[in-house]
Amino acid sequence: FFSPALMMRHVALFLRVGSCRASAPTRGVRGFSTAAQPAFDSRNPFQVLGVDPGAEIDAIKKQYYKLSMIHHPDSTQGDDATFKKLNKAYHDVLDIRAGRLTEEAFEDSFEEWLRGLKEAKAKREKMASQMRKEEDFQLR
């Protein structure tokens, strides 16, 4: 029924459905997109914008403009929190390029986030053990 090439196109189309189409696709091997996709839950500003760290300023501005048009709070798909993350990431990338910020600053913030996550987990486990002790005491 289907040739392998046609089947691969259908698979590629299926995988792209629902993904953010704001990044300019570049064609790689067999027509698959090799452009970075935005990751709004990331702390790395380059990942939030969906650009490579070595991208030109014009490409970064173009990507920011595309994403801001999609995620602006006044648009139909717009979300205020996502737009704020996008805006902060754009300005952070410009600051990194201007030398006012370093990429290591984001690695440090990731370490702080991970440390806070571990502390919260330890606190939850401590509260759970206290609740188990209280339940055991009440059952006696």
Image (cartoon, rainbow, N blue to C red):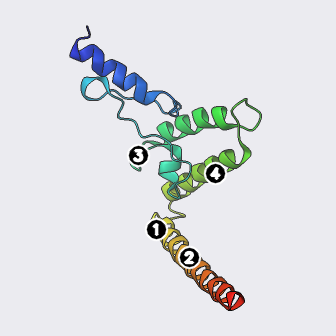
Q: Which mark is residue 121?
A: 2
Tag count in the figure?
4
According to the picture, the residue beneath numbered tag 1 turns out to be 107
According to the picture, the residue beneath numbered tag 4 turns out to be 85
Task: Using the image as rendered, state which of residue 9 and residue 73 is in the foreground.
Answer: 9
Q: Residue at x 75, y 38 (%)?
A: 73
Q: Where is residue 78 shown, x and y percent of the image?
A: 70, 36
Question: Secondary structure beneath disc 1?
Answer: helix
Q: Nearer the viewer, mark 1 or mark 3?
A: 1
Question: Which amino acid is tagged 4?
Answer: Lys
Question: Which amino acid is tagged 1?
Answer: Glu
* Pointer 1 or 4: first along the chain: 4
Task: Using the image as rendered, state which of residue 2 and residue 56 is in the foreground.
Answer: 2
* Pointer 2 or 1: first along the chain: 1
Q: Is residue 95 left or right of residue 73?
A: left
Q: Where is residue 119 shown, x and y percent of the image?
A: 56, 80
Outermost residue toward the left?
Answer: 4
Q: Where is residue 129 shown, x and y percent of the image?
A: 59, 85
Question: Which amino acid is tagged 3?
Answer: Asp
Q: Nearer the viewer, mark 2 or mark 4?
A: 2
Report the quarter where the N terminus lies: top left
Question: Secondary structure beneath disc 2?
Answer: helix
Task: Using the image as rendered, state which of residue 12 and residue 112 is in the foreground.
Answer: 12
Q: CA distance from mark 4 to mark 3?
A: 17 Å
Report the quarter where the C terminus lies: bottom right
According to the picture, the residue beneath numbered tag 3 turns out to be 52
Q: Is residue 123 left or right of residue 34?
A: right
Query: Toward which corner of the image does residue 117 lie, by quadrant?
Result: bottom right
